[in-house]
Amino acid sequence: MANELTIGTLLESESAAPARLLASRMNRHTFWCGQSGSGKTYALGVALEQIMLHTRLPLVIFDPNSDFVKLGEIRDDAPEAEAAELRTRDIRVRHSTTGAGDPLRTRFLQMPLRSRAAILQIDPVLNPDDYNTMLRMETDISLIEDHDLVGFMRSHPDRIRHELAMRLENLGVAEWKLWAWGERSITDEIDELPDATVVDLGGFATQAESRAAALAVLDHLWENREQRIGRLIVIDEAHNLCTPEPATPVEKLLTERIVQIAAEGRKYGLWLLLSTQRPSKVHPNALSQCDNLALMRMSSPRDLADLSEVFGYAPESLLERSPAFTQGQALFAGGFVDQPSLVQMGARLTHEGGSDVKVPLR
């Protein structure tokens, strides 16, 4: 059936019955977790492939470790019928690594004022003159020629604009390769509703640039929420973007935006899938909004206790078995399964992007 996504086999079944997720219940937020080596990223890829095969739900995948950059590359051993179907899907990967493929770019001047100010480390209360100048500049943005923002600001007699230009240069923001400056933006790709858009965040020189890229995409999705286009927003290593203790202005806005989508996004068709190794490192106000749970091997008593408290629909007797899971085994609970189930994940149809560093042998 189209509503059923086959992801593997049931561990408790004598006949190795297929394990399935309910596609129609992906319209809830999902929490996907497992410690390093549990097979979390591989298993997530299995689920995403099935979503692309059996639904028209556009995926926006935040990929900090380049694990999903090969999502469009079919494995030679993939079943032919599924492989042929998957080849028809529109999968776009935008890279942060120079020369790796289509570049990940976004438009600085189209980001919300608060986000641009956060990138420049300008607080509206602590830096009122700077922020107010940015606010008054909003009417001038259309006048900027040749995308020379620094030159435009220096050409104005206002001293504070000169200081803002200096801040752009001193922080290195003006030179970030993230900015489109007339090129195609990642938001243009997303608006065309491909089956999947992979936002490869791992190749930027600094975390600041990577997080600015993530913020630009999340801002765009939220600003266009009234379109009510169903989207699954997949955030791998979610603890990097939605931490309980954000330190920088951009981290604070990222966490605020993700928590906002977790609290209000469902009615607009913005559904989160948060994947991480450490549940305790994800903001509790995002975690508590998840109605679906995928749990792979997790040995930390603290994390298991947190999961038991937050996800009351997951039987404690099954949660307790998590430390003994082997690679690729998982507990699924919540609305996207008929009943809590232990699953052996199936094989990927596409290649996994990231890889471990091998031990050199003599």
Image (tube, rainbow, N blue to C red):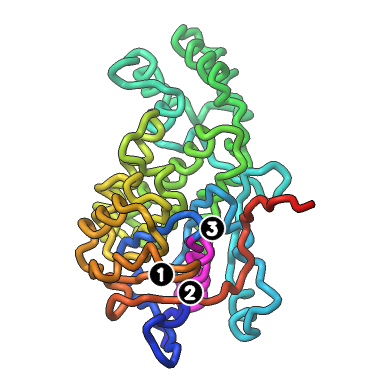
> At label 1, which amino acid type do we have?
Ala
The magenta stretch is: 38-56
> At label 3, which amino acid type do we have?
Thr
Considering the numbered disc 3 on the image, is that residue within a helix, a strand or a loop? strand
Q: Which residue carries the number 3 mark? A: 197
- Position of residue 322 measured from the top left corner of the image (x, y, whole percent): 36, 65
- Residue at (37, 29) in percent of width and height: 247
Task: Report the disc number at residue 345.
Answer: 2
Q: CA distance from mark 3 to mark 1?
A: 26 Å
Q: CA distance from mark 3 to mark 2?
A: 24 Å
- Residue at (70, 49) in percent of width and height: 100
Q: Main secondary structure of the magenta part?
A: helix
Would residue 94 be counted in the magenta stretch?
no
Q: Disc 3, disc 2: CB below 8 Å?
A: no
> At label 2, which amino acid type do we have?
Met
First-in-chain label (3 vs 1):
3
- Position of residue 143 measured from the top left corner of the image (x, y, whole percent): 52, 27
Considering the numbered disc 2 on the image, is that residue within a helix, a strand or a loop? strand
Q: Which residue carries the number 1 mark? A: 330
Would residue 46 be counted in the magenta stretch?
yes
